[in-house]
Amino acid sequence: MIPRQVLKSFYNNNLVSSLCTQPEYQKSVQVSILGAGSRLGTYTSFLLKQNPLISALHLQGCLGVENIGKDLSHMDTSCAVHSYCGMDSGVEKAVKSADVVLILPTENLSADTPIGERIMKEGSRLHKVAVRCTLFAPRAILVVCVPPVSVTTPLVTEVFKKSNFYHPGRIIGSTAFAQVKANSLLGRYQDLDPQAVYTPLIGGPDVDLAVPLFGQAKPVEVIGKNTQMSLTAQFRGVNPTEFPKVSGKRDFFEKADMAESYGINMLVSTIALGLCGDQNAYANVFLRTNLVDVCKYLVTTVRFSRGGVVHNCGLPQLNKHELDLLEKATLELKEREDMAKEYLEFVENKDNSSELPSFVEKERKRQELLNQRIVR
């Protein structure tokens, strides 16, 4: 009598492979970088040019992007580089054959620029880019890297909802800088190679809203509430003695173009591995989800495959101080989602109305209160 294990092995190796069609995966991906002329775009292009998973790089930006493309084309890697100058035709040509589209910021803003001012300066271009992507790259995976990502990602999503190609698993917000900052901080604390550690993230994509789960880090977690809170305070740039009463710096977005470009390269590599058939392509990203009732978008761990996100790992078990930080983050994320909707209405009705979005007036009043001096 033939043993059951032998029959099972024969069935798996022969009958299943002959009767079932195996999925065919691509061997490489093409990446489009919108806003490649900026400093962040230059660093990101330089790293992606050396990525073996990328067969073609499409750069779009201002006049200087053509020089960047020519410079990168001299590097002896297999990735081909194409550069396109201009907004209308440039975006169309850059995204039409891309599997992954990176939307990078182009405005050179200071780190303490208020959120409302950032949206008003970057929003118009971002809206135009999103509309172009609905026409010429409807099935590509869009990675939004324009800060604040907690506002710009819902804005791009709302634009896609008006088209026939909306898929929540194809529009994600980048947590690149928050991820590499958390890993680097943890690696230095544990005296380990930062490349060998992993810190799960939840909450928002920006550093002021991200909640790093140091107690669930790999390969060695951080033990002790005080130590975890101290690391979280350093992560958010807050004095540990004032945390969590002061949970973060409002209207402050740290500029670290080299670190962020490195994180974007790692995120694109994970997405490319998923598109090429890797079953372990996991990453922390900001996307549309229904895990909590307060807000519609949240950072969670997801798995990538053909078509984008195919599995959301959800929220892990949290301790009390992590729950408190997540609660504050979700309330702020809800406000930023409303800001995205207000700005979209403003852009679409700009010809019929001259009123600015309500968040602009709220921010102006708040700045006036902060600038007031008490006279005794």
Image (cartoon, rainbow, N blue to C red):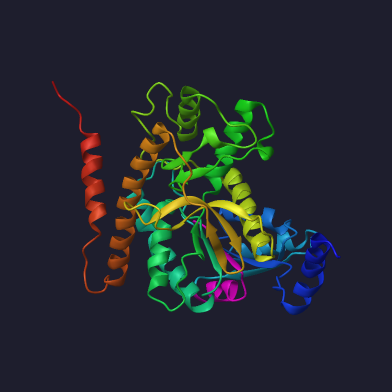
Q: Which residue occupies the foreground of this view, 256 or 265?
A: 265
Q: Which residue occupies the foreground of this view, 165 or 142?
A: 165
Q: Residue at 72% x, 77% y: name it.
A: 20
Q: Residue at 59% x, 72% y: name it.
A: 94
Q: In this rendering, would 349 be left or right of 297?
A: left
- What is the number of callouts on the image? 0
Q: In the rendering, at what x and y percent does residue 230 appear? A: 47, 25
Q: Residue at 44% x, 73% y: name it.
A: 131
Question: In the rendered structure, which segment of residues is drawn in magenta?
Answer: 88-105
Q: Is residue 41 above or below residue 96?
A: above
Q: Which quadrant, please, contains the N terminus? A: bottom right
Q: In this rendering, would 11 be left or right of 58?
A: right
Q: In the rendering, at what x and y percent does residue 115 appear? A: 35, 49
Q: Residue at 22% x, 49% y: name it.
A: 362
Q: Which quadrant, please, contains the C terminus? A: top left
| Residue lying furthest front | 1
Residue 11 part of the magenta segment: no
Residue 62 in sight: no
Residue 359 in sight: yes
Q: In the rendering, at what x and y percent does residue 344 appear? A: 32, 65
Q: Which residue occupies the foreground of this view, 119 or 134?
A: 134
